[in-house]
Amino acid sequence: MRRYVCPNCGSGKLAPAHARRDDVRVYCLLCSERTGRLVRRVCEAAQREASDREARKAARKVREAVARREALARREGRRQVRRSWEQPLRDLHRDWKRLRSWGRRLTCGLTIKRTDRGSRGWAHLLRDTIVVYVDTPESDSLEARVTLLHELAHIAAPLDAHHGREWRELYLAAAAEVLGVESIPVPPGRGSKFVLDEAVRTAMRGLAGPSWS
Ligand SMILES: [Zn+2]
Ligand SMILES: [Zn+2]
């Protein structure tokens, strides 16, 4: 039961918290008679509860807004860290798309992904884009550079070249151009992609070439 009080005369009555609309205890009949209109008693406890509810709701809204802002700032911070980490390999990608060895200006995009299972990559020829997985602290580590050049050669080569002659020639020519050397020494034989990667890796190793300094 709650106490309902008349706002005019202050007389009170007990009535259920959720009194029916036509419950006479909720109305001050004397004041109603006197004024000619129904005078409703006010349940102060209910009003207090309602305003407490409002206050709690407002506080929760503030807390939620703060949490959202903080989450956004964390995400933005992570994005900036990621952007600056990716930048060295992105710079190489931008420069190496313009190598004369390709025979044309490449337009492919680049997605860089962190991994802990070995640097690798793939070229999506139809979508004209490259994905490079990097497992080293620097995005432009030796492994990542070799992978990037390897994949760019796929983009430059004909669709059906795979790791065939055209791809190999483009790859080696581009590596030589990047390093500013006549040619890349490759062990005799047909030269699988692994042999070529190793040859390019060896040629690049320890060389802080002008192209990416
Ligand atoms: Zn009254
Ligand atoms: Zn390949």
Image (cartoon, helix red, strand yellow):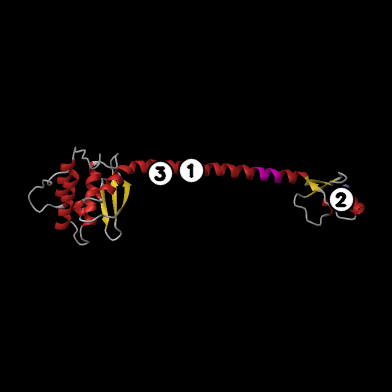
Residue 180 painted magenta: no
Q: Residue 71: which numbered mark, if any?
A: 1
Q: Position of residue 121 (x, y in %)?
A: 26, 51
Out of 110 and 105, give the one closest to the viewer. Answer: 105
* 27 to the left or right of 103: right
Q: Amino acid at mark 2?
A: Cys
- Between label 2 and label 1, give the one nearer the viewer: 1
* Whole-number angstrom distance, CA of label 2 to CA of label 1: 54 Å
* 138 to the left or right of 51: left
First reached walking from the N terminus: tag 3 or tag 1: 1
Q: Is mark 2 within 8 Å of ligand 1?
A: yes
Q: Position of residue 199 (x, y in %)?
A: 14, 46
At label 1, counting other C-alpha atoms closer than 10 Å, the crowd grade (few under 14, some 14-19, many 20 or more) is few
Which residue in the rendered view is the most extreme toward the right? 34
The residue drawn where x is 59% and y is 45% is: 61
Name the residue carrying label 3: 79
Out of 173 and 63, give the one closest to the viewer. Answer: 173
As displayed, is residue 156 above or below residue 182?
A: below
At label 2, counting other C-alpha atoms closer than 10 Å, the crowd grade (few under 14, some 14-19, many 20 or more) is many
Stretch of the chain drawn in magenta: 50-55
- Between label 3 and label 1, give the one nearer the viewer: 3
Please say whether residue 164 is visible from this viewpoint: no
The residue drawn where x is 53% and y is 42% is: 67
Q: Label 1's element?
A: helix
User: Which quadrant of the rendered structure holds the C terminus?
Assistant: top left
Characterize the magenta stretch by its predominant secondary structure. helix
